Amino acid sequence: MPAMVQEIKVPVGRFTALWSERGLSRLLFPGTTPFPAAKGTAATDSAAGLVALWAEKLSQLVKVYFNGGAVDFGEIPVDFTGYTPFQLRVLQFVRAIPYGTVVTYGAVAAALYRPGAARAVGQVLARNRTPVVVPCHRVVGRGWYGGFSAGRRWKEELLHLEGVTLFDSSSRGPAGQA
């Protein structure tokens, strides 16, 4: 049972955030299939106030983000419970990718001293429970967008929102190339 369930309405729809006493445990996109129920316990009285403050900050940041503002979600605590050490390293690395920047799966693997582990990085990001806050949409393949748990359309929308154009709509190659 999550400590708190929060709905955040933005121009593109309604997001659902699930919180534990450790931080954000899930962020669900509008129209996506929900993840399995969050594990955790109801917030104690002392933690409930803190969770409410985090939730209010997330709501403000998500609204600014989806209205075109450059946002850093770094101050939102994330509950990384249940991830392996490798998964945690990937998610923490990806969390630090700046707004409007993209890197490849291979570059993430190389930065973590695991060259050749691009596919493993992709598998970790496919299981990211807190997209946008841990901006896995900023990780792409060489010559393609790559996957995204909420669907490729969302990944393209998020990158477009951040001013990133990788591929134009008239070709399958990088923007500006036929």
Image (tube, rainbow, N blue to C red):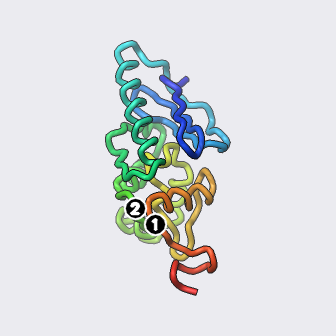
User: What is the secondary structure assignment of the residue under circle 2?
Assistant: loop
Mark 1 or mark 2, which is nearer the start of the sequence?
A: 2
Q: Viewer-proximal residue, 107 or 83? A: 107
Label 1 neighbour load within 10 Å: few <14, some 14-19, many 20+ = some
Q: Amino acid at mark 1?
A: Val
Placement of 45 over or under 150, stated as above or below: above
Give the left or right position of residue 15, taking residue 162 as reference.
right
Q: Do the residues under discs 2 and 1 have CB atoms within 8 angstroms?
A: yes
Specify the quadrant that holds the N terminus: top right
Image location (x, y in percent) of residue 129: 52, 43
Q: Viewer-proximal residue, 87 or 152? A: 152
Image location (x, y in percent) of residue 170: 63, 78
The residue singled out by tag 1 in the image is 164
**Residue at (50, 66) in percent of width and height:** 140
Q: Amino acid at mark 2?
A: Gly
Q: Residue furthest bottom?
A: 178
**Residue at (50, 62) in percent of width and height:** 160
The residue singled out by tag 2 in the image is 100
Q: Viewer-proximal residue, 161 or 154? A: 161
Label 2 neighbour load within 10 Å: few <14, some 14-19, many 20+ = some
**Residue at (43, 40) in percent of width and height:** 80
